[in-house]
Image (cartoon, helix red, strand yellow):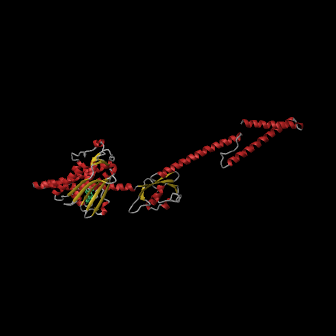
Amino acid sequence: MLGRFIFFLGCLSAGAALGAWLDTYWPQRQALAWGLLMAAVLWMLQDIVRAGQFLSWLRHDQPNEDGPKAGVWGDITSRVRRLLRTRERQTSESQARLHDFLSAMQASPNGVMLLDGGSHIEWCNQTSAMHFGLDPKRDLMQTIGNLVRDPGFASYMAARDFRSSMTMPGRDSTPSRPVTLSVQLHPYGDGRKLLLSRDITLLEQAEAMRRDFVANVSHEIRTPLTVLAGFVETLQTLKLGESERQQYLALMAQQADRMQSLVSDLLTLSRLEGSAPPGVDALVSVPALMRQLETDALSLSQVMGEAGSADHQFVFDCDFDGFLAGTASELFSAMGNLVSNAVRYTPADGHITVSIRPRADGCLVFSVADTGPGIAAEHLGRLTERFYRVDRSRSRETGGTGLGLAIVKHVAQRHGAVLSIASTMGRGSVFSLVFPSQRVVLAATASDAHTAKSNPFFPLDAPSSDAAAISGLV
Ligand code: ADP
């Protein structure tokens, strides 16, 4: 401002000097007026030049460069430049925020679609595009109703009641692999809508499994309960001889045992599902485990033999002197279930070979081979499903709960092992558990610390509850 004033005084002095020089022609006053006029003209000329510079600077593509530097125009230029920089920073910040926001919506596991007032697609993430079979670029600004042709969705849009969600088949849904979507519209702003979609196929499957499970458990418990209630009524109403009474009581005890095994297997399953996977600290002695399996298998076969149904030829082959890292009761339960299945399903005089041996890659293979009836190939994939039975009557006759192989599968998974089943109809089956080398510890390398922490199978002196459960299956 001071510069501008000095410049103005300069103009004035130049005008006055010119007036003095012309004094000979005009009186003094006129000379001063000339001076002032000159000052004003010079002032105006300078302003016009600076304003021109400012305008050309504003019109420039990059207004941050050059522009008037001095005087009021210089001041205005630097203020405008600062304002522009602030705006530019704000714009790039809000662009970055928008980018982050869209990336977050893109990362959402659910489908997100923005529709304008006319239900045209303004934006959608990849998941939404996949759910509805759209191309997020090509289908922009298309009407959603023209692209999603499901009748349920069309009537949902037409009803304009978006308080609850609707379900519809996903674009990739096929009869063999159904995909179910849960879709809901959320109105916002000026007639706009947010369309959220979620793949609920697994949820629906889990719900169906839960329903099946409850139905199966109820059915399994109702059968022995009905039989028990029948016997109780018979005992209450009929006058029976002592031997008949004893016979009925024995049958009642059998049904009660059946319910007990079922409840115990259900509890085992829920324990397996609800607890953390076993660590590698506790070691289970493999030879001790095999000895216990042998004792229980022989007694089960003997009990079945007494009942007139079986008497088997056994081979127990333990080719490993070491430990398995895991939970003793779980390992015993899994291996015991495989052995007890072989005993229960193999007819009298059948051969059962139980072996455990290391593989060249360091894994340990436990296998149970029998010469039983075998299992048809179409059943093999479903054997580990809860309550899945190939031979319903044989399973029930021998006290099976239909949960044995489900337990084996869970224990195997928890120990990083793989269960494999091979079977030939009429010739027999082989069930194998392959334990990873990380869980296999040779006796020579097992440290004192490990052996101190090892479980009841080292040494195995008292039969566990699982052992008792196996003996009590029939
Ligand atoms: P269950 O308590 O009925 O034995 P499992 O889950 O242990 O239930 O086994 C599932 C089904 O697999 C059995 O019902 C039976 O039909 C079949 N199965 C299991 N092991 C054998 C085997 N060694 N030989 C023939 N069939 C078997």
Q: Quadrant of the N terminus?
A: top right
In the current view of this chain or complex, which residue is farthest to the front?
444
Q: Residue 88 at what x, y percent from top left? A: 60, 46
Q: Quadrant of the C terminus?
A: bottom left
Q: Residue 357 at what x, y percent from top left? A: 28, 53
Q: Nearer the viewer, residue 143 or 66?
A: 66
Q: How many marks?
A: 0
Please indicate whether residue 75 sits to the left or right of residue 35 in the image.
left
Query: Can see residue 154?
Result: yes
Q: Residue at x 27, y 59 (%)?
A: 430
Q: Residue at x 84, y 38 (%)?
A: 18
Q: Nearer the viewer, residue 288 or 128?
A: 288
Query: Can see residue 403?
Result: no
Q: Nearer the viewer, residue 220 or 366?
A: 366
Q: Residue 202 at what x, y percent from top left? A: 38, 55
Q: Residue 40 at what x, y percent from top left? A: 78, 40
In which quadrant of this rendering is ligand 1 seen?
bottom left
In the current view of this chain or complex, which residue is farthest to the left?
241
Q: Residue at x 72, y 45 (%)?
A: 53
In the current view of this chain or complex, which residue is farthest to the right?
24
Q: Quadrant of residue 433?
A: bottom left
Please indicate whether residue 72 sits to the left or right of residue 222 in the image.
right
